[in-house]
Image (cartoon, helix red, strand yellow):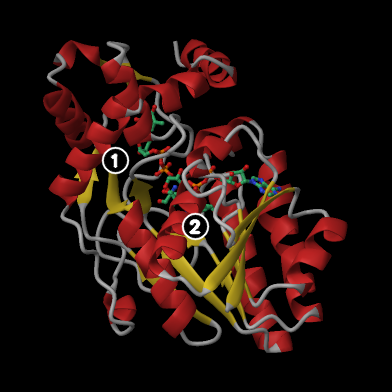
Amino acid sequence: MRTLLVTGGAGFIGSNFIRYMLNKHSNIRIVNLDKLTYAGNLDNLRDIEKDDRYRFVKGDICDASIVDPLVKEVDIIVNFAAESHVDRSIGSPDDFIQTDVFGTFVLLEAARKYSIDRFVQISTDEVYGSTENGFFNETDTLNPSSPYAASKCGADRLVYSYYVTYKLPVVIPRSSNNFGPYQYPEKLISLFTTNAIEDKSLPIYGDGLNVRDWLYVVDNCEGVEAVMERGGDGEVYNLGAGNEKTNLEITGLILKDLGKPESLMTYVEDRLGHDRRYALDTSKIKTLDWAPRHTFEDAMAETVAWYRDNETWWKKIKSGEYLEYYRQQYKQSH
Ligand code: NAD
Ligand code: DAU
């Protein structure tokens, strides 16, 4: 029986990862350490909260007095905890530096102290920055653009330094844009789908031609597991599905799927420092015998259907703090 400490497990990808791991393996325990920021939501894990193999601890990864005793009792750390939204990092970078960089440092120190078997740092393709052509591989120069991407980049390299300096057995998956169920309705697909269901406008930044490589969250969870189980110590692995789409293409798909009019599309001021395109060379992760199992079309249809069928989940969120934030964003861009 192995025990995993999953940080940020009440968020979008972390909750999907916990569900995926508990459903797949009978012989694991998971401790979920989450601060429950605006993005953390215990509703994401209602179906497994009574599972004997699962334990939730509310706490901050920056707090060593909480982190240390937990790390002492686990074998592996999977660090999803982060401030994750680029727009918020532009308005208010402080929490990003604190959680994404300092929080990772606190976890690393505990991992070193208790000789953890594996430290999995969830990184992102945003650390490479933007490229109009070609595909980034794991040894390319890092050139992050936003305070979010820069703080993730700092954490990514800090984790690597613990491998080089202290021989801590770390691995670093760098994933592309995830989509799927339980994504906080502030990101492109979750926001636009829920807005369209409510016949609200879809705020398209700039010309809508920015490109992202979309990865279904379940495929990402499988990729993170592959890296955790079979990745080499100190190695970085790009995780992408090769589903390059412009924001306008994504918007069109959502509207078509929901039978909503194009008149909901609203062009707004561009995001500051908006990266044009992310694209990953994924040859290395293939050596770990991973490939996405879902087609983009099927995963998109399932995702849109999930938001259509789970209005209670996102309406609860949108009726609260988020609505105020969205109003402020909208005001700023007009
Ligand atoms: P999310 O914002 O949905 O969830 C983040 C979770 O971390 C929340 O539950 C939040 O409460 C928790 N958290 C924040 N600060 C904390 C702290 N100080 N201590 C403990 N918990 C804290 O994010 P997500 O989209 O699920 O992303 C998860 C991870 O994956 C992040 O590290 C992100 O950088 C990375 N990532 C995300 C994507 C994507 O497309 N969403 C792609 C690549 C990488
Ligand atoms: O690439 C991986 C990253 O993907 C993760 O590391 C981040 O945590 C995650 O938030 C995501 O970052 P992006 O900035 O790419 O995702 P977001 O959904 O915010 O935006 C996707 C694209 O859609 C981007 O070009 C901006 C645009 N957009 C977004 C929103 C929220 C809009 O046009 N309008 C919007 O309202």
Give how far across and how far down residue 44 sits, in percent. 49, 40
Seen in the picture, residue 159 relative to 132 is either above or below; the reply is below
Q: Quadrant of the C terminus?
A: top left
Q: Secondary structure at mark 1?
A: loop
Give how far across and how far down residue 175 sits, in percent. 40, 60
Q: Quadrant of the N terminus?
A: bottom right
Q: Earlier in the sequence, mark 2 or mark 1?
A: 2
In the image, what residue occupies the spot 22% across and 29% down?
Answer: 251
Give how far across and how far down residue 56 sits, in percent. 66, 51
Seen in the picture, residue 59 relative to 201 is either above or below; the reply is below
Is 169 or 305 nearer to us in this picture? Answer: 305
Is 207 or 113 nearer to us in this picture? Answer: 113
Hey, which quadrant is residue 163 in on the image? bottom right
Can residue 206 be seen in the rendering of this structure? no
In the image, what residue occupies the spot 82% across and 57% down?
Answer: 66
> Label 1 CB, ligand 2: below 8 Å?
yes
Is 233 or 116 nearer to us in this picture? Answer: 116
Are the residues tagged 2 and 1 within 8 Å (C-beta)?
no
Crowdedness near tag 2: few (<14), some (14–19) or many (≥20) residues, C-alpha within 10 Å: many
Identified by mark 2, the residue type is: Ile
Seen in the picture, residue 85 relative to 16 is either above or below; the reply is above
Checking the image for residue 210, the label placed there is 1
Q: CA distance from mark 2 to mark 1?
A: 31 Å
Residue depth check, mark 2 versus mark 1: number of the one nearer the observer: 2
Q: Secondary structure at mark 2?
A: helix
Crowdedness near tag 1: few (<14), some (14–19) or many (≥20) residues, C-alpha within 10 Å: some
Give how far across and how far down residue 278 sits, in percent. 33, 54
Q: Look at mark 2 in the image and give the residue it sits on.
A: 18
Lateral position of residue 165 relative to residue 208, left or right: right
Lateral position of residue 191 relative to residue 292, left or right: right
Identified by mark 1, the residue type is: Asn
